Image (cartoon, grey):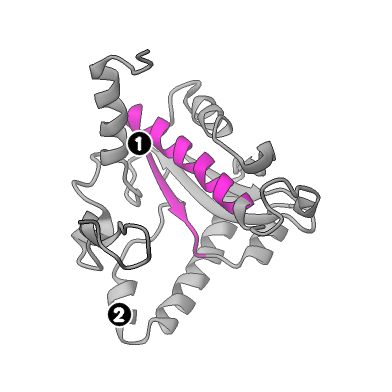
Amino acid sequence: MNHAYPPEQIDGVYRAISERRDVRHFVPGPLQEGQLERFIAAAHNGPSVGFMQPWRFIRISSMDLRRAIHRLVDEERELTAQALNQRSEEFMRLKVEGILQCAEVLVVGLIDKREDFVFGRRTMPEMDLASASCAIQNFWLAARAEGIGVGWVSLFDPQRLRQLCGMPEGSQPIAVLCVGQVEEFYKAPMLELEGWDKRRPIEQIIYENSWGKTVE
């Protein structure tokens, strides 16, 4: 029994995966009506361990709050540069966010009282983060398919961002998403284009039967 999509639809899925980029450069202009809602719906269709659906999305419509988040990120950017030692100057030349330029800013957080969810998490409680990451990937791919850029910003103090966004005790912010129009998508990941690092060859990331044993 063949459950595969038609070839052109399969190509579209792989194209979105291949051309998805972590975007930092945005151009002015709002999203089209309904786009943000579709992206969030795509995220909410993501898989989650024990069907716990640990993700929550906070749309930042206040410009004052957006600026406060930007200041928080900029502070962490400076601290990260210090921690990078010999690569600090190289890091400071990178553009790491587009919070003040993009059309929409979302804060993605994990719910509180996550200890109540044991199914699939008894030995690996971090699976709530893995589940939320899958949701963000769905958001990212849906946006790319519609020609909208998304950047995942993780440079922030979680406790301070949680307080800024009025999140309950025990919840955890994991991402600031910048969403908006782009002039073009990077031909390759931005950090690769900037010479920060490069993608590993497939043969270096797949083993057979035991760690480090390459596939023959």
- Badge 1 crowding class, 10 Å Cα cut-off, few under 14, some 14 to 19, many 20 or more, is many
Quadrant of the drawing holding the C terminus: bottom left
Main secondary structure found in the magenta portion: helix
Quadrant of the drawing holding the N terminus: top left
Q: Nearer the viewer, residue 166 or 172?
A: 172
Q: Is residue 150 magenta?
A: yes
Q: Position of residue 83 (x, y in %)?
A: 44, 83
Asked if residue 103 shows in the view, the reply is no
What's the residue at 40%, 78% (across, down)? 81
What's the residue at 31%, 46% (across, down)? 21
Q: Is residue 16 left or right of residue 49?
A: left
- Residue found farthest to the bottom: 86
**Which residue is identified by label 1?**
181
**Which residue is identified by label 2?**
89
In the picture shown, does residue 166 fall above or below 45?
A: below
Q: Position of residue 12 (x, y in %)?
A: 28, 25
Instruction: Give the magenta part as a residue range.
Output: 128-155
Q: Quadrant of residue 142?
A: top left
**Secondary structure under the numbered disc 2 in the rendered image:** helix
In the picture shown, does residue 216 fall above or below 101?
A: below
Q: Is residue 166 left or right of residue 202?
A: right
